[in-house]
Amino acid sequence: MTKAKPVVSSVPDLSVIVSMYNEEDSLKSFFTEIQKVLNSLKKYSYEIVCIDDGSTDKTFSLLTQYAKKDERIKVIKFSRNFGKEYGMMAGLKYCRGRAAIPIDVDLQDPPELIERFVEKWEQGYDMVYGIRKDRQSDTFLKRMTAKMFYKIYNLMTRSPIPYNAGDYRLLDRKVINAILSLRENNIFMKGIFGWTGFKSVGIKYTRQKRVAGESKWNYWKLWNFALDGITASTTLPLRIWSYLGTLLAMSGMAYALYIIIRTIIKGIDVPGYASLLVFILVLGGIQMIILGIIGEYIGRIFMEVKNRPLYIVEEKVNIDNE
Ligand code: UDP
Ligand code: MG
């Protein structure tokens, strides 16, 4: 047996995890606000794990300046933009806290909430998640589409996502380790949180407007995000077609029987061109949709089989664990 290494630095209580992409304008107010809150929680030590998700602006150089002044600020720089989900995965991997709190840098998630997260954590909850009370800061269309997504997702999967819960939450070490034990590449965080189980509770809050810069989401990205989420969590879209197929085949047979009987009684009649065309078009369309859905899954299987690393780290500052 190898001897355990002596613990060099002590484990912080809380690890705040923040992924950022071109956020030079939001950084200053973020650190001011978050440190105000964290410093007021005197009982708890903390670290702030920042992931620079391939920013092309000054985000990384600003971050290193902060990290030089305060070694509780840790920085991981990705080699390119991988996406927030992967930023959070890296944060979870490199954080050492007894609990982790993923948060957005744009202060849309009010840092004051951390106090209430920690209170619930003390009461024995392993996961405390923020629930957006209203989405007034989002456009009507975004609210509508988000609502539809939650409805469809929850109908199809066995571990539903609480409506309007975001990534802003507190995760106990147990939950962090459960998430880190996953081997998949296509990670849909929102779904994974619920999937891990554990004792959880939600806290309502009002989501604020962005302090600076603008959201990097557009509808095409959101649509693909929704597809990733559903295909990562359920195979229902693949399976429903056999039922529809059975139904169609059965009605086809019934119709055939009807035609046979009618021909025997009334003789052959030629019309039916329009109905024939409709059937061909509808069935052809349905078959293509099914092929498309199978394609969605095969594409993802392909990506999983390649088993690439989730992200590439280019540089680390103040990070001493592997
Ligand atoms: N973000 C990231 N990588 C990306 C896009 C966004 O790390 O490719 C970060 C971003 O800097 C912010 C958080 O994810 O800290 C939320 O992004 P945004 O505000 O654009 O999303 P929204 O609040 O509109 O959902
Ligand atoms: Mg935002």
Image (tube, rainbow, N blue to C red):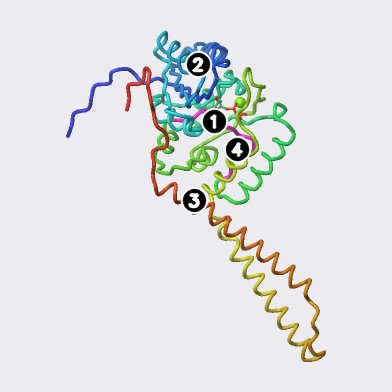
- Give the residue type that dot 3 points to: Gly
Left or right of 273 on screen, residue 27: left
Mark 1 Cβ and ligand 1 under 8 Å apart:
no
* 216 horizontally vs 19: left or right: right
Q: Give the quarter of the image for residue 132.
A: top right
Q: Amino acid at mark 1?
A: Val
Mark 4, residue position:
221
Residue 9 screen position, x and y as percent: 32, 17
Q: Earlier in the sequence, mark 4 or mark 2?
A: 2
Q: Are marks 4 and 2 in contact (CB under 8 Å)?
A: no
The residues tagged by marks 1 and 3 sit, at their Cα atoms, a distance apart of 34 Å
Q: Which residue is mark 3?
A: 299
Q: Which residue is mark 1?
A: 128
Q: Nearer the viewer, residue 185 or 36?
A: 185
Secondary structure at badge 3 equals: helix
Q: Residues within 10 Å of mark 1 (few under 14, many from 20)?
A: many
Q: Mark 2 or 1, which is nearer the eye?
A: 2
* Residue 14, magenta (yes or no): no
